[in-house]
Image: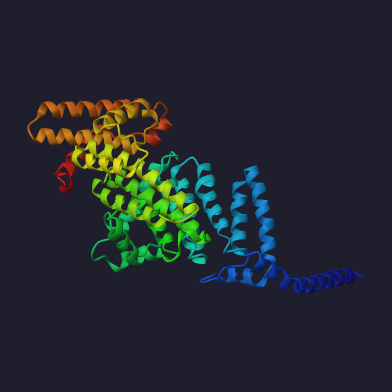
Amino acid sequence: MKKAPSIFLLLAALLGLWGAAGLHERLWAYRARHQLLPAAPLENASPLMVFTTVALGGFRGLIADLLWLRAIRLQQEGRIFEIAQLADWIAKLEPHFTTVWAFQAWNMAYNISVLFPDAENRWRWVCNGIRLLRDEGLVYNPRNPSLYKELGWLYQHKIGYIMDSAHPFYKRKLAETMQAALHGARLGADPKEADLQRLREELKLDPAHMRQLDAECGPFDWRLPETHALYWAWRGRHMVPETSAPATASSGWSGVRACDQMMLQCLATAFRQGRLDFDPATDLYVTTPRLDLLPQVMRFYEETIARYIGNAGSARDDERFIRSVYANFLGEAIIVLHCYGRDAQAREIYRQVLRQHPDVDRTISYDDFIGASFSAMQKDVIDLPPPTAIAVVEGLLFQACRQRAAGDSATAAEDERRARAFWDLYMQARVSEDHRQRTGLPELDILRRQAERRLREPEMTDDG
């Protein structure tokens, strides 16, 4: 008698499987009509991934949808670790559902990392998010530009920006990793095979692509997070053929536009703070402007704008947006060049802005623009980005070094005084310890040594 319920349940299960088999083709056809099927078969998939995608067939989408609804509810309840597990299941069910890969990586790098008070554990979860996108998400979606942009964002914003109080620790850990792999700031002419293997297998960086990016836009310091963001955005924007026009509004082009914008942001950042002085032994990590990158940055802005000229719809909006961003960047570049005494180059760029950007007030002279900009920086010093403040202070200290070398001690003393006054003003505006930790400047003596070293470099021997 006890066997009867078991036999009944077994028969019910078999009947359910028979019914599911009958629904399988209809579910598959429905998902195909609504573009819910994978765009391509899985490549390099694990046995578990292959099993779930093949064995469950059309049902896996329904299961993924239910899990996604559950994840949204858990997000509202703040149950972050459970979300990470659910997202992992969803990714195994729907490996081409790129939103899940991006969400899961973001959840690890942003939500889970900040639950830990110590920087080491935070860094571990930031790396988990990066590895998830880089080592898994892109393996199953190698031609999705949006996923490359999401990976670049983790480098550009989570590591490179100042929102997380642990960002200095993240930057140092990345710099240590890359310095160990490259034995310097960039890939050498004759690297060891072991180093190339580490780049390819551990860091997923293609040495040939690194060299190509350096040749096209750089060279860059590969210890900086913005260089990695630039690399992944550059890789992503090449996932859609150049023959495809922005006006087609294809799904790939939305990702390419995002990659274009990220590349512009990272190139501008490389100009602002692309020069790194790093010494793990003394915990020194100081970034200052890379003035020699300005022509490459300007060229890339202009080439990007040219790709959108004459296209309809959103492409024309993108063109207007990039032109506006470019004008703002040139205004910032003029101030930076002036700080380092490169007024001839700054004046030429100011004339270019007046020629090419009709919205700019042509009644304002170069000298008035400089004066108004410095007044605005001093007035809003609490919101001034650290790279801009460093450029002002180090630039004045550089000019002091140059005047002192020329025998003009009086002008050198005045530039030194102005540098100290601006440094004091900026640091006094940062009242809380957290604000100082996230946005504070290096000590004045450190910036003075940077200025002295810069004076000996070829790029600074003339006025541009």
> Does 60 sit left or right of 243 as displayed?
right
> Does 89 sit left or right of 15 as displayed?
left
Residue drawn at x 37%, y 50% is: 264
Q: Is residue 80 above or below residue 407?
A: below
User: Quick check: can you spot residue 286?
Assistant: no
- x and y percent of residue 458 in the render? 15, 48
Q: Is residue 47 above or below residue 446?
A: below
- x and y percent of residue 268 in the render? 34, 47
Quadrant of the frame with the C terminus: top left
User: Quick check: can you spot residue 266?
Assistant: yes
Q: Quadrant of residue 59?
A: bottom right
Quadrant of the frame with the N terminus: bottom right
- x and y percent of residue 302 in the render? 33, 52
> Does 124 sit left or right of 411 as displayed?
right
Residue drawn at x 67%, y 58% is: 65
Residue drawn at x 51%, y 64% is: 141
Residue situated in front as seen by the camera: 396 or 420: 396
Protein image colouring: rainbow
Q: Quadrant of residue 58?
A: bottom right
Which residue ends up furthest to the left in the rendered image? 407
